[in-house]
Amino acid sequence: MNGIVIDIDPVFLRIGRFELHWYSLAIIAAIAAAIAIVLHQARKKGIPSSEIYSIALWSVIAGILGARAFHVIDHFDYYLSNPSQILQFQGLAIWGGLVTGVVTGAVCAWLKHMPLGRLFDIVVPALLVAQIIGRFGCIVNGDAYGGVTDLPWGFIYTNPNALIPSHLLGVPTHPYPVYEILWNGASLLLLLKLRRYFKVDGLVFVSYVGLYSVGRLLLTLVREETQVLWGLQQAQVLALAGMIIAAGVFAYLQVRGRRGGVVEGETVSG
């Protein structure tokens, strides 16, 4: 049987009833890295750190709750039978975190009269780095598993505490977290280069949404999740919506920029 054996207990530390998971450590590291990156980018744009901390607090809380809610909805039958596990937070849907976190951040920024497009562009590198770090936690957790494969780089989960379904335990599966790490890494490098050429605030962010949506639509083909619409999984339906919205907003911002409109307080020349 070819593949890479993952025999790591998802629980990093046990003290009585308290358990600290590798996944939790990855999420904490992802949040810390994201905030540090945003603060660095904000200083370069003249945005006070105090404003970033305030927005980050509410965005992180909303993002985690939203990510958990989307995950529970996507696995509703399981949690309907195991309601006590809903609050364990061992499984987060990135789409849920993005939607609720971004919306919350946008509302907070709007209330503070901050330039939304500029703020969203600043956040993009932080989001991608956070997603990459978070997926390393998924590698140990076994919750973001792919379908069965005979490829030599397939993951074989053998630890009984891994969150992969029992019928896939000991079976080579697509290393989905690795695929997404590589996609997000490539997207990060591309957007860091493209942002030098974007003259309109918000273009970096909508490009990120579009790229991530394309990645999820394609990469999710190797996953085994519940189909919710037109034979597509929840992540793919949301990815299609993300692609359409991102394309529309991108076109609008480009036209606005070419017309020399005012974008986030700056005059854009065509």
Image: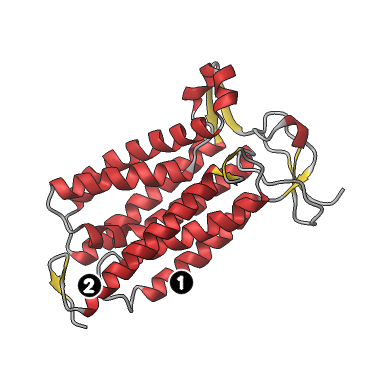
Decide if residue 218 is on the left or right side of residue 169.
left
Decide if residue 125 is on the left or right side of residue 174.
left
Residue at 56%, 37% (x, y): give it: 22
Q: CA distance from mark 2 to mark 1?
A: 23 Å
Decide if residue 144 is on the left or right side of residue 250.
right
Nearer to us in this view, 13 or 224: 224
Residue at 58%, 61% (x, y): give it: 182
User: Helix, strand or loop at disc 2?
Assistant: helix
Q: Using the image, tell me which numbered label, if any, was put on residue 1.
A: none
Residue 245, position as x, y percentages in the image? 37, 57
The picture quadrant where one finds residue 265 is bottom left
User: Helix, strand or loop at disc 1?
Assistant: helix
Residue 108, position as x, y percentages in the image? 20, 44
The picture quadrant where one finds residue 119 is bottom left
Q: Are marks 2 and 1 in contact (CB under 8 Å)?
A: no
Q: Where is 139 relative to 213, above or below?
A: above
Residue at 55%, 55% (x, y): give it: 217
Q: Where is 236 relative to 263, above or below?
A: above
Residue 39 visible, this angle? yes
- Mark 1 sits on what residue? 190
Q: Nearer the viewer, mark 2 or mark 1?
A: 2
Badge 2 amino acid: Arg
- Give the mark nearer the N terminus: 2 vs 1: 1
Residue 78, position as x, y percentages in the image? 60, 24
Residue 207, position as x, y percentages in the image? 39, 65
Badge 1 amino acid: Leu
Residue at 41%, 42% (x, y): give it: 97
Q: Which residue of the protein is positioned furthest toward the right in this rendering?
A: 1
Q: Using the image, tell me which numbered label, if any, was put on residue 256.
A: 2
